[in-house]
Amino acid sequence: MSAERPPDAAPRLLRGGIRARLGPGVRLADVAPGGDPDRLLTRPDCDVLKLQPKVTVGAVSTPAGRIYVKRYNVFAWRVALASLWRSSPAAAAWQAAAALGARGFATPEPLAAIDVRRGGLLRKSFFITREVAGAVTADRFWQMILQEPASRRGPGRRAVAHALGDLFRRLHAAGVYHNDLKDVNVLVEGPAETMRCVLLDLERVRIVRRLGRRRRVKNLMQLARTLGPQASASDRLRFLAAYLGDAAGRDERRAWARAVGRAAARKDAGRRAVATGPQPRVSCTVIAQDEEAMIEGCLASVAWCDEIVVVDGGSADRTVAVARRFTDRVLSHAWPGHRAQKQFALEATTGDWVLNLDADERVSPELVSEIRAALADVPPGVGGFAIPRLVGYLGRWWYRGGWYPRRVVRLVRRTTTRWGGTDPHERALVSGTVRWLEAPILHYTYRDISDHLRSVNHLTTVAAAERSGRRIGAGRFLVEPFWRFLRAYVLAGGALEGFPGLFTAGTGAFYAFLRAAKVWELQVHAATASAKGAGGRPRARASS
């Protein structure tokens, strides 16, 4: 953690408009391969903790140790234009870490602040910190305290309330204002009696000469709305006693409590109530074969499901052993094809709803929340939910190039669903209406370009076998590949991704061409075999 002020050196200008501030002994290559931290965020072994329009957060192991990468997205033109005269969020977080360290407050150790600019406009910004080992957010820490035996629960609650109240008191006395001081933005390490608080979301920190009552109430309200509902009235009063100090009397504490309550009520006014009905039972199915390298991340992302069913098609690696760490429902079934294997998996489940994933996919944190909210109040006529997929490949998330959103029906009502389509493009057929979800499934399609080309070769072979009876003409060889390239590269914005956009558009066009060529080849082989068969049969005797 940051115990002293980190070096506040001016950023170094690197190639391609990259500006970087680096901590002592930190190499750019360790925290930003190729100068781009997106290469870390889009790795399959990166634990994506937040994926939102404004910010993405991931934790990943690197030569510099376990690190957290926070990417600030330039999500609107007004943000890009304001970056001409304002510091980037990453630079603000770097400076806040220095200011907080100088005032005796703990933050994660800053490793780097990296900006990417084009023509002076900010394109993306990254703040990279070292993991605080063993620390958890304040909300999780409070839940752990509540699960303790009664003899330890009371002292733990008193200690946490006092520690958080003292933290807020010291912050405000030092002129530190955090614009979003809720429970998830405070890490806690150590036991409750000696807990230490570590501040997150540092780009929101401002240092002022004197903190007015309005801002103080706002900070207290932010904690009250998040951690407060899980606390008792006594817990909240202990927090206020620690915050206001021994000199404050009961009337003053109650006045502050009323002010915080009114602020929370104003914040919640007009907000749509979240459905809180009973949750139906959710199963997850994953079909796999030789997916040792990918299936662990997939299954970890669905640990919240009531049942996980993995169907293995005959793996030669450790796929089954890895899967058994997450579920005892690991079934062996000789590979019959994508569609039939998914139908077998569906029939093996017992949940009311079934979420289907491939081994190279993950459920994003936002999707988990959205699924729970949707299933808490789903009408009887709804048979499934279509979910967008976001591809991580070549060091970027593919929002362009025609790869997003491409919604697929993956969350279905078990009793009204069967699998159809043609391999390798199987699809869920549901009875009832299909609704859309907005948060994505994360899809790690290819390890690299070589893996991409191997996949194209395999999938076109499977697809050609399904289409062998179709007529193949010039349209399939020329028009369809050209249209695919034009659609991906020009209409879907692939050109804005530089060479990776050109490559993916080209391989999409090549996929269509190669599939048509393999259909043609199968038809030639079939015609040749038919001719040989006809030539080898005895000729009919002429009638006299």
Image (spheres, rainbow, N blue to C red):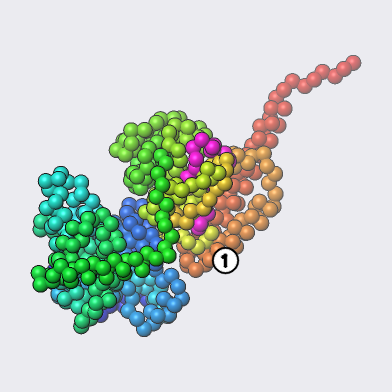
Report the magenta residues as a range. 404-425
Residue at (57, 66) in percent of width and height:
490
**Is residue 402 something that shows in the picture?**
yes
Disc 1: which residue: 490
Counting from the top left corner in percent of width and height, residue 104 is at 13, 71
Q: Is residue 412 above or below residue 175?
A: above
Residue at (26, 64) in percent of width and height:
223
Residue 228, located in which quarter of the rendered image?
bottom left
Tell me if 106 is positioned left or right of 301 in this view. left
Counting from the top left corner in percent of width and height, residue 45 is at 32, 52
* 417 in the magenta segment: yes
**Is residue 426 something that shows in the picture?**
no
Residue at (44, 43) in percent of width and height:
355
Residue at (51, 57) in percent of width and height:
405
Tell me if 392 is positioned left or right of 236 in this view. right
* 237 in the magenta segment: no
Q: The residue under label 1 is which amino acid type?
A: Val
Q: Is residue 55 above or below residue 144?
A: below
Q: How many marks?
A: 1
Q: Is residue 507 above or below residue 209?
A: above
Q: Nearer the viewer, residue 329 or 524?
A: 329
For label 1, count other residues whose C-alpha is less than 10 Å away and answer few (under 14), some (14-19) or many (20+). some
Name the image quarter holding the N terminus. Answer: bottom left
Tell me if 73 is positioned left or right of 127 in this view. right
Q: Nearer the viewer, residue 29 or 194?
A: 194
Tell me if 182 is positioned left or right of 78 in this view. left
Q: Nearer the viewer, residue 191 or 409?
A: 191
Name the image quarter holding the C terminus. Answer: top right
Residue 356, located in which quarter of the rendered image?
top left
- Label 1 sits on a secondary structure element that is helix
Counting from the top left corner in percent of width and height, residue 106 is at 17, 67
